Image (cartoon, grey):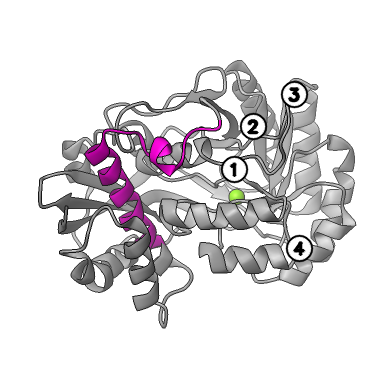
């Protein structure tokens, strides 16, 4: 079964209301989708996640100009071989960032094809499911503008409780005083009914990151995400050794090589590759092995479209706990609580949690049917 065509779709959707996080204001969401078709007519879909304000045209160009020409005629089932070819051929200008994001989209599409060809969901092909459902945590707590919105954050915490979430992640990184104000208000609402984690999106240097962590030490946080910039491995280690809170990171890291360095630096307790950025299913298998060998939990970052959400769910099903026993820790699913059409309208069966849990898809491949009319309506000229 050979690859016959590789197509890219650049999607952009203006948000009705822009939102803020510690790194800036986000007025739109965008993504790059890839459709691969084989010579016997099977098609697979993949996504390259557009981070923040990343122009989605970059990933599309890499697929179109760098990857597609070498993919035509390749064995669509040979996902390891194709991944190594794509990575090796782009090594001198790739290795991190959007090039690996483009490779991710192709790899996800090929696993979708493999599942459809063999009549199995991707999680079964990866080696089986360690669990038949995955617990979600609510990700949200974005700001309308920035500081001074603790009342809105408290209301949002109540909404997540009402919707059945028992775990939620609060966006911080707006300065220590504002961060603590938000956390105190959220804790008052939650009142022991949910576990919390925090994410500052690398807004701080290691000294301020430690100060925030110490101020929150009695919050029993599940994790503290991206305390410092991804390049500052010594800062990560300093934060990790200074606090009793598990440190999470990796949404801005790529492939087995990047995670090898992050883990060797003793920077993190929890690895968070994004399947639509770090290299697809194939790379998550590599990263998962390195994480497991170091006693580190793999907990994928998820903020893409329905394609990325489904891919992450398959990967989470196949992720082992680094411990073994009756009650080992389990990977959690990052559940985007914003209402966005790329999540809810791109596929005919969008993922919807039930009381904070997602069941595994049972149909072949990723288990999605793309609404092509929606893709056409939201595609931009590129
Ligand atoms: Mg994050």
Question: Alpha carbon of mark 2 to alpha carbon of mark 4: how far?
Answer: 36 Å
Question: Alpha carbon of mark 3 to alpha carbon of mark 2: how far?
Answer: 14 Å
Nearest the camera: 273 or 56?
A: 273
Rendered image quadrant of residue 55: bottom left
Q: Which residue is mark 4?
A: 266
**In x, y percent, where is residue 202?**
66, 60
Of badges 4 and 1, nearer the viewer stands 4
Location of the C terminus (image quadrant): bottom left
Of badges 3 and 2, nearer the viewer stands 3
Q: Which mark is residue 152?
A: 2
Q: Secondary structure at mark 2?
A: helix
| Mark toward the start of the polypeptide (3 vs 2) | 2
Q: Which mark is residue 143?
A: 1
Vertical position of residue 144 compared to residue 160: above or below: below
Q: Which mark is residue 223?
A: none
Q: Give the magenta part as a residue range.
A: 101-130
Question: Alpha carbon of mark 4 to alpha carbon of mark 1: how far?
Answer: 32 Å
Q: Are marks 2 and 4 in contact (CB under 8 Å)?
A: no
| Mark toward the start of the polypeptide (2 vs 1) | 1
Dot 2, how many residues are within 10 Å of its Cα: few (below 14), some (14-19), or many (20+)?
some
Of badges 3 and 4, nearer the viewer stands 4
**In x, y percent, where is residue 251?**
56, 55
Q: Is residue 29 left or right of residue 322?
A: left
Dot 4, how many residues are within 10 Å of its Cα: few (below 14), some (14-19), or many (20+)?
some
Q: Residue furthest bottom?
A: 92
Total marks in image: 4
Q: Which residue is mark 3?
A: 190
Rendered image quadrant of residue 165: top right
Q: Is mark 3 within 8 Å of ligand 1?
A: no
Residue 102 is inside the magenta segment: yes
Q: Are marks 4 and 1 in contact (CB under 8 Å)?
A: no
């Amino acid at each position: 079964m050979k690859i016959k065509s590789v197509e890219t779709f650049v999607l952009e959707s203006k948000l009705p209301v822009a939102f803020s996080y510690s790194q800036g204001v986000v007025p739109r969401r965008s993504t790059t989708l890839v459709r691969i078709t084989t010579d016997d007519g099977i098609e697979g879909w993949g996504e390259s996640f557009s981070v923040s304000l990343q122009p989605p045209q970059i990933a599309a160009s890499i697929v179109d100009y760098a990857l597609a020409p070498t993919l035509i005629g390749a064995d669509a089932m040979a996902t390891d071989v194709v991944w190594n070819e794509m990575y090796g051929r782009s090594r001198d200008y790739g290795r991190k960032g959007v090039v690996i994001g483009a490779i991710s989209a192709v790899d996800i599409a090929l696993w979708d094809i493999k599942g459809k060809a063999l009549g199995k969901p991707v999680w079964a092909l990866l080696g089986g499911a360690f669990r038949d459902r995955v617990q979600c945590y609510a990700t949200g707590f974005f700001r309308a503008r920035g500081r001074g919105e603790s009342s809105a954050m408290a209301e949002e915490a109540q909404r997540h409780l009402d919707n059945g979430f028992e775990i939620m992640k609060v966006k911080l990184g707006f300065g220590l005083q504002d961060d603590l104000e938000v956390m105190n208000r959220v804790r008052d609402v939650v009142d022991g009914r949910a576990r919390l984690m925090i994410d500052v999106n690398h807004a701080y240097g290691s000294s301020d990151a430690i100060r925030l962590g110490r101020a929150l030490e009695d919050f029993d946080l599940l994790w503290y995400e991206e305390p410092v910039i991804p390049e500052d491995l010594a800062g990560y280690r300093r934060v990790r050794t200074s606090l009793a809170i598990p440190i999470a990171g990796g949404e801005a890291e790529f492939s087995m090589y990047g995670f090898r360095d992050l883990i060797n630096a003793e920077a993190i307790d929890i690895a968070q590759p994004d399947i639509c950025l770090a290299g697809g299913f194939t790379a998550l298998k590599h990263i998962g092995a390195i994480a497991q060998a170091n006693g580190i939990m793999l907990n994928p970052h998820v903020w893409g479209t329905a394609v990325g959400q489904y891919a992450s769910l398959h990967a989470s099903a196949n992720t082992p706990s680094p411990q073994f026993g009756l009650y080992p820790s389990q990977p959690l699913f990052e559940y985007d609580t914003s209402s966005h059409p790329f999540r809810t309208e791109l596929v005919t069966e969008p993922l919807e949690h039930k009381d904070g849990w997602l069941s595994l898809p049972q149909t072949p491949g990723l288990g999605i049917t793309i609404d092509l009319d929606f893709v056409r309506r939201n595609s931009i000229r590129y």
